Amino acid sequence: MKKWLTVYVVNLYLLYLIPLILSFISAERLYENKYYILTVWFVVFVLTHITGLGNIIYIVVSRIRKQYIENSLKIITRVKFALIPFYIFNFFTCLLVFGAFLNPFLMWLLPIIIPMAVLFVFGTLITTSLYAVFAITDLKKEGIIKNSTPHYILQFIFVLDIVDSIYLYIKKYKPHYGKAKTFLLTSLPILIPVSINVILCIIVGITMVLNGDFQN
C-alpha cells in the first residue's frame, strides 16, 4: 500500500515539477530537446495513471479477498496531507491555462480542456479516497463511528475529504481528546493552506484589475 501510494504521489508532483524546472531553461535549448522533453513528460504522465489505476485495483482486490490493510487510515491521512500543496499548485496552474485559452482563437478548446482538468483532479481524489472509504467501513465494524454514510460522502468532496480524514484519525487514535480540541485539530491544518490560497487569489485578482487585464 505504502509503495503504490508513494510512487503515485511522486509522479503527481513530477508532472508539474518538470515544466517548472524547464521554465528556467532557455527557449533555444528547449526547442533543441523538445522531443526528448515531451517523451519524458509523457512517460511520467502515463506512469501516474498506471500507478493511480494500480492503487484502485489493489484496494478493490484486497477488499474482495477480505484482506485487512493495517494502519490504512493513518497512511491515507498522511497522503492527503502530502497532496495539499499539489492541489493548491494545480489550482493556480489551471487558472493560468484557462486564462491563456480565453484567447478568441483558442476559446473553442475550453469545452475539451475543462472536463479533462476536472477528471484528472477528481481521479486523484478517487484514488486516495477509496482507501479512506474502506477504512471507514472498518471503523464502523469496530464501533468507533456509528453512521458511516456522511463520511463516505465527505471523502469525495475536495477539502472536506481531508477534514473528515483528520477527524476520523483523531477519533481512532486520540479518543481521549474532547470535542473542542478535536474540532480545532481537524480545522486548523486545512484552514491555513485554504486561507493562503484565498489570499493569493485575491492578490492575483487585484493585480489583474490594476494592470487593466479585464478591460476590453
Image: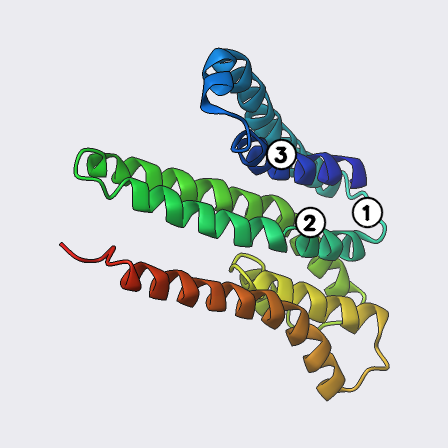
Q: Position of residue 92 (x, y in %)?
A: 46, 51
Q: Of residues 132 and 48, which is closer to you in this image?
A: 48
Q: Earlier in the sequence, mark 2 or mark 1?
A: 1
Above or below 170: residue 123? above
Amino acid at dot 3: Leu
Query: Circle 3 — which element?
Result: helix
Q: Position of residue 127 (x, y in %)?
A: 61, 43
> Crowdedness of circle 2 by 10 Å Cα count: few (<14), some, many (20+)?
many
Q: Of residues 14 and 121, which is closer to you in this image?
A: 14
Residue position for label 2: 131
- Which label was assigned to residue 69? 1
Q: Position of residue 151 (x, y in %)?
A: 61, 66
Q: Nearer the viewer, mark 1 or mark 3?
A: 3
- At 41% across and 46% down in the image, what residue appears? 94
Real-space Cα separation, disc 2 to disc 1, in angstroms: 9 Å
Amino acid at dot 2: Tyr
Query: Circle 1 — which element?
Result: loop
Q: Of residues 154 and 85, which is closer to you in this image?
A: 85
> Disc 2, disc 3: CB below 8 Å?
no
Residue position for label 3: 14
Q: Nearer the viewer, mark 2 or mark 3?
A: 3
- At 66% across and 74% down in the image, what residue appears? 188
Q: How many marks?
A: 3
Residue 143 seen by the camera: no
> Disc 2, disc 1: CB below 8 Å?
yes
Residue 6 seen by the camera: yes
